[in-house]
Image: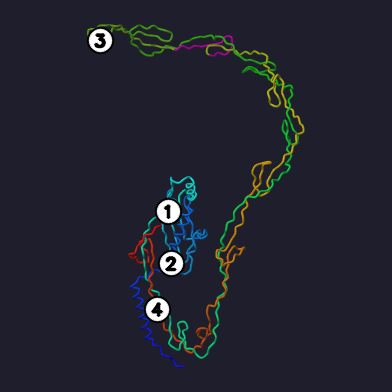
C-alpha cells in the first residue's frame, strides 16, 4: 500500500492562521463571562417569574405583615411554572424567592429574587392599592364592589410604577473544531485511517434502561368532626353521714357531751421570804433600840493661820489662838475715803471627835442602833385548784367531756358519664356530648402525567427504555456509518476550527451589567 506524505509545514501555517484570527476576535470584541452566555434566556425567565409573582400577590394573597415564598412554594401553588435555562437545567427553587412586606395601610414592597445556575438578579417593586368609593351608586352596587375587593379592603387596581430599563449587548466567539482527512482516508476521532478490504458490520450500542424519580405533589387532607355515644354506668357507692364524720370502720361518728367532777389539787405556800415548817410558816425579823453613844477627842494640832475682821470662839474640834490685832483702811473708792477696820490674827488648832456605840441590852450595832434577831409563826396558806384531764377549764368544779356516738352511714349510687377513649367531651351528665376531630388522609399525585405514582413511597417514577446511542467496531477497525473497515494506515487528522461571532441582547434595570456592554437604547415599563 502506498503511504501518502503529510505536509507538516502546511498544517502548521494553517493552525497559526487560525490562532491569529482568534486573537484578533478577542481584541475586537469583549467576551462575556461564562455565566452570561445565557443572559437573554435568564432575562426572559426573570420577566416571567416577576409577572407571575406580582399577579399572585395583587389578586388575593396579600399578607397581614410580611411573607417569604420560595420559587418551589409558588410552583406548588400553581402561581408559576418551572423555569429552565438554555441547558435544560431548572432554576434554583430554594435560592429563588419572593418577599412581600407591608409598608403602609395600602402599600407593599415586593422583592423578587431569581437564581438560575451561576446567574442571579433581583428587583424591588412597590405595590399600591387605591380604595374605590362611588357615592352615586346605590347600596346594592356598593355591596357588590365590597365583595369584589380584596381582604384588606382595597381594590385590585395597582398604582403603576415606572421603571427604566437599559439595553445591553455582548459578542461571543463560538469555536467549533473539526477534523478532516484526505480522500481515501476515514476519520476516526482525531486520526485518519486508510481502510483495508476487510469489513465487518458494526455492533449496535444501547443506553441502559433507567428510571426517573420525582417527588409527588401532596394534597393536604381536611378535617371533620365525628361523634360517639356517651358511656353511662353506675358509679362507685357514695357513702355519707347526716351528722358527724365517716370513720375508718365505715361507721358514722357523731359527738355527744357529759358532765363529770373536775380533778382537784391542793397547793400550800408562805409569804415571800418565809419558811414553811409543817402546817406553819416561820417568819424571821429583827427588833432594834438606840445604841449607847460615847465620845472622845484626839490631841490638838496646829492647822493654819487666819486674818479675819471678827473675833473667833473655840468649839469642840476647833481652837483659835489670838496673835494680835491691827487697823486697816478698807475704803478704796478715793484717796480721801477713810474706813478703818480692826483685823484679828489667829493660829488655828483642830482635833478629831471619836464617837463609840455599845449595846448594853445585847444585839448587833449598826449605824447607831442595836439589832436583835427574833421569829414568829403563822398558819401556812392553802388553795385548792380544779382542772380537767383534757385540758379544758372546769365550770363549777365540773368538766364537760365529749363522747363518740357511732351509727350506720347512708349509701347512695350516682350515674357516671364519660366518653370513649380518644374522644373529647362538651357538657356534663345527661347533656354530655362526645366528639373528636378526624383528619382525612393526604392524597398524592404526579404533576407530570407521564410519571406513575407509587402509593407506598409517595414518589413518582417513569421508566426510560433503552435507546440506540451508536455503534462499536472491534479493535483494528474504524467505524464508517454502520460498517467497520479494517485499518491499513493510521495518521493524525487535520484540525479545522470554525469561529462564529454571536451577538446577544438583553434589557435590565441595572445601570451596569457585568460582562455586557450598554447601548444607547432605553425603555420605560410600568410595573
**Can you say whether 506 is above or below 126 in the image?**
below
For this view, does 400 lie left or right of residue 516? right
Q: Along the line of sight, which residue is nearer the eye, 38 or 505?
A: 505
Badge 2: how crowded within 10 Å, few (<14), some, or many (20+)? some
Numbered badge on residue 333: 3
Badge 1: how crowded within 10 Å, few (<14), some, or many (20+)? some
Place of residue 158 in the rendered image (x, y in percent of width and height, measured from the top left): 42, 53
State yes or no: residue 360 in magenta.
Answer: yes
Numbered badge on residue 498: 4
Residue position for label 1: 158
Between the residue at mark 1 and the residue at mark 3, the CA separation in whole angstroms equals 125 Å
| Mark in front: 3 vs 2 | 2
Between the residue at mark 3 and the residue at mark 4, the CA separation in whole angstroms equals 154 Å
- Provide the residue span drawn in magenta: 352-366
**Can you say whether 167 is above or below 327 in the image?**
below
The C terminus: image quadrant: bottom left
State yes or no: residue 53 in magenta.
Answer: no
Which comes before the other along the chain, label 4 or label 2? 2
**Direction bottom: furthest residue:** 1
Numbered badge on residue 41: 2
Between the residue at mark 2 and the residue at mark 1, the CA separation in whole angstroms equals 28 Å
* The quadrant where residue 177 appears: bottom left
Amino acid at each position: 500500500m502506498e503511504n501518502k506524505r503529510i505536509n507538516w509545514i502546511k498544517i502548521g501555517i494553517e493552525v497559526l492562521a487560525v490562532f491569529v484570527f482568534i486573537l484578533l476576535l478577542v481584541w475586537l470584541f469583549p467576551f462575556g463571562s461564562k455565566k452570561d452566555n445565557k443572559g437573554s434566556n435568564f432575562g426572559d425567565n426573570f420577566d416571567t417569574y416577576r409577572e407571575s409573582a406580582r399577579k399572585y400577590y395583587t389578586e388575593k394573597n396579600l399578607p397581614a405583615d410580611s411573607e417569604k415564598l420560595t420559587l418551589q412554594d409558588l410552583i406548588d401553588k400553581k402561581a408559576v411554572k418551572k423555569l429552565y435555562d438554555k441547558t435544560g437545567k431548572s432554576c434554583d427553587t430554594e435560592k429563588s424567592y419572593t418577599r412581600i412586606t407591608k409598608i403602609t395601610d395600602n402599600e407593599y414592597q415586593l422583592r423578587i429574587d431569581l437564581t438560575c445556575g451561576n446567574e442571579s438578579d433581583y428587583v424591588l417593586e412597590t405595590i399600591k392599592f387605591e380604595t374605590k368609593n362611588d357615592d352615586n351608586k346605590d347600596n346594592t352596587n356598593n355591596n357588590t364592589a365590597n365583595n369584589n375587593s380584596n381582604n384588606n379592603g382595597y381594590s385590585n387596581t395597582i398604582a403603576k410604577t415606572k421603571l427604566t430599563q437599559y439595553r445591553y449587548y455582548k459578542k461571543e466567539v463560538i469555536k467549533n473544531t473539526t477534523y478532516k482527512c484526505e480522500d481515501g482516508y476515514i476519520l476516526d476521532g482525531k486520526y485518519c485511517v486508510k481502510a483495508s478490504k476487510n469489513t465487518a458490520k458494526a455492533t449496535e450500542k444501547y443506553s441502559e434502561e433507567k428510571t426517573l424519580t420525582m417527588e409527588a405533589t401532596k394534597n393536604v387532607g381536611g378535617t371533620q368532626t365525628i361523634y360517639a355515644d356517651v358511656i353511662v354506668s353506675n358509679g362507685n357507692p357514695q357513702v355519707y353521714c347526716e351528722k358527724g364524720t365517716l370513720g375508718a370502720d365505715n361507721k358514722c361518728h357523731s359527738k355527744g357531751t357529759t358532765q363529770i367532777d373536775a380533778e382537784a389539787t391542793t397547793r400550800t405556800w408562805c409569804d415571800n421570804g418565809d419558811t414553811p415548817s409543817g402546817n406553819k410558816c416561820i417568819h424571821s425579823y429583827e427588833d432594834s433600840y438606840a445604841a449607847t453613844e460615847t465620845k472622845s477627842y484626839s490631841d490638838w494640832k496646829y492647822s493654819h493661820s487666819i486674818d479675819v475682821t471678827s473675833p473667833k470662839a473655840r468649839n469642840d474640834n476647833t481652837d483659835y489662838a489670838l496673835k494680835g490685832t491691827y487697823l486697816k483702811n478698807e475704803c478704796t473708792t478715793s484717796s480721801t475715803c477713810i474706813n478703818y477696820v480692826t483685823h484679828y490674827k489667829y493660829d488655828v488648832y483642830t482635833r478629831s471627835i471619836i464617837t463609840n456605840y455599845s449595846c448594853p441590852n445585847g444585839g448587833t450595832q449598826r449605824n447607831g442602833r442595836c439589832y436583835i434577831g427574833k421569829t414568829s409563826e403563822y398558819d401556812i396558806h392553802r388553795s385548792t385548784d380544779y382542772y380537767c384531764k383534757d385540758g379544758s377549764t372546769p365550770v363549777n368544779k365540773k368538766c364537760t367531756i365529749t363522747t363518740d356516738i357511732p351509727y350506720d352511714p347512708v349509701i347512695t349510687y350516682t350515674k357516671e358519664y364519660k366518653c370513649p377513649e380518644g374522644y373529647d367531651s362538651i357538657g356534663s351528665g345527661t347533656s354530655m356530648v362526645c366528639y373528636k376531630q378526624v383528619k382525612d388522609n393526604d392524597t398524592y399525585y404526579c404533576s407530570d402525567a407521564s410519571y406513575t405514582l407509587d402509593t407506598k413511597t409517595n414518589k413518582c417514577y417513569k421508566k426510560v427504555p433503552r435507546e440506540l446511542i451508536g455503534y462499536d467496531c472491534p479493535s483494528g477497525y474504524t467505524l464508517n456509518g454502520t460498517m467497520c473497515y479494517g485499518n491499513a494506515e493510521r495518521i493524525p487528522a487535520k484540525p479545522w476550527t470554525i469561529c462564529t461571532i454571536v451577538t446577544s441582547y438583553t434589557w435590565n434595570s441595572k445601570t451596569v451589567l457585568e460582562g455586557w456592554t450598554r447601548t444607547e437604547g432605553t425603555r420605560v415599563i410600568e410595573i
